[in-house]
Image (cartoon, coloured by chain):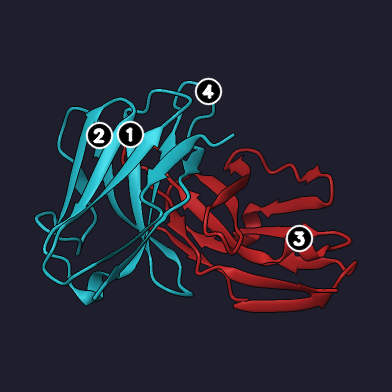
Chain colours: A cyan, B red
Amino acid sequence: GAVVSQHPSWVICKSGTSVKIECRSLDFQATTMFWYRQFPKQSLMLMATSNEGSKATYEQGVEKDKFLINHASLTLSTLTVTSAHPEDSSFYICSTRNGRVAKNIQYFGAGTRLSVL
Amino acid sequence: AQKVTQAQTEISVVEKEDVTLDCVYETRDTTYYLFWYKQPPSGELVFLIRRNSFDEQNEISGRYSWNFQKSTSSFNFTITASQVVDSAVYFCALSVPGGGADGLTFGKGTHLIIQP
């Protein structure tokens, strides 16, 4: 069964609105989750590392004020795309890892396809 | 900085043929992990294998096998007797552990098409 649940799977929004994407770790507590972005027919790019109870660590070039990450519990991390614009349209995927069992193996959610009109 | 190169953008073979997907990586760290993931059209990434930098043993799992060679910084993936269900995009990835900041660096992926 799925290890990671990501919701919604697909969202269309108007330019200027904010969109929240949830990532839940179903089978274990995850102190660390990761957010990736994938443009069509391209690779996945790490956006940020989400740490439970502390601020997220953003990769170079990723605007932290635009992509707000909240990791308030050991099973839930959220990514909010604020004031979305068409260029933010992409496939967003989260992942978690179970550091106690299979270190460094990341399990991915099904992804969220965001289309900004 | 880490880098993963998958030179093959797309491979198309006929069912039952063997196919090898190439992966070359770059890192200055001596401890690292290599991965292969499969991404079917649905989009979800499926974990296939993890290999750490100290274990150069090749691995076989059913029709899948992996050849890790540190001397050439390669971690190639072979599918034997391919099937239509193997059609997907396959990503090779690298992570360097430590400090919690060990997100994956992905290659650009190889789109594998298995024709019936």
Q: CA distance from mark 3 to mark 1?
A: 32 Å
- Where disc 3 sits, the SS reads helix
Where residue A61 sits: x, y (%)? Answer: 19, 64
Q: CA distance from mark 2 to mark 4?
A: 18 Å
Q: Amino acid at mark 2?
A: Asn
Quarter of the image for the C terminus of chain A: give it.
bottom left
Q: Is residue B59 left or right of residue B32?
A: right
Number of other residues with Cα within 10 Å of mark 2, as a class: few under 14, some 14 to 19, many 20 or more = many
- Circle 3 chain: B
Q: Are marks 3 and 1 on the same chain?
A: no
Q: Is residue B47 left or right of residue A67?
A: right
Question: Which of these two is toward me, B29 or B2?
Answer: B2
Q: Nearer the viewer, mark 3 or mark 4?
A: 3
- Circle 2 chain: A
- Where disc 2 sits, the SS reads strand
- Where does label 3 land, which residue? B85
Q: Residue at x 55, y 68 (%)?
A: B109
Q: Are marks 3 and 4 on the same chain?
A: no
Task: Determine the image quadrant of residue A114.
Answer: bottom left
Q: Nearer the viewer, mark 2 or mark 3?
A: 3
Q: Amino acid at mark 1?
A: Thr
Which label number is shown at residue A101? 4
Specify which label sits upstream in the sequence, 2 or 4.
Answer: 2
Task: Determine the image quadrant of residue B86.
Answer: bottom right
- Where does label 2 land, which residue? A51
Where residue A75 sits: x, y (%)? Answer: 34, 28
- Where disc 1 sits, the SS reads strand
Question: Which of these two is toward me, A116 or B26?
Answer: A116
Q: Amino acid at mark 4?
A: Val
Q: Amino acid at mark 3?
A: Val
Q: CA distance from mark 2 to mark 1?
A: 5 Å
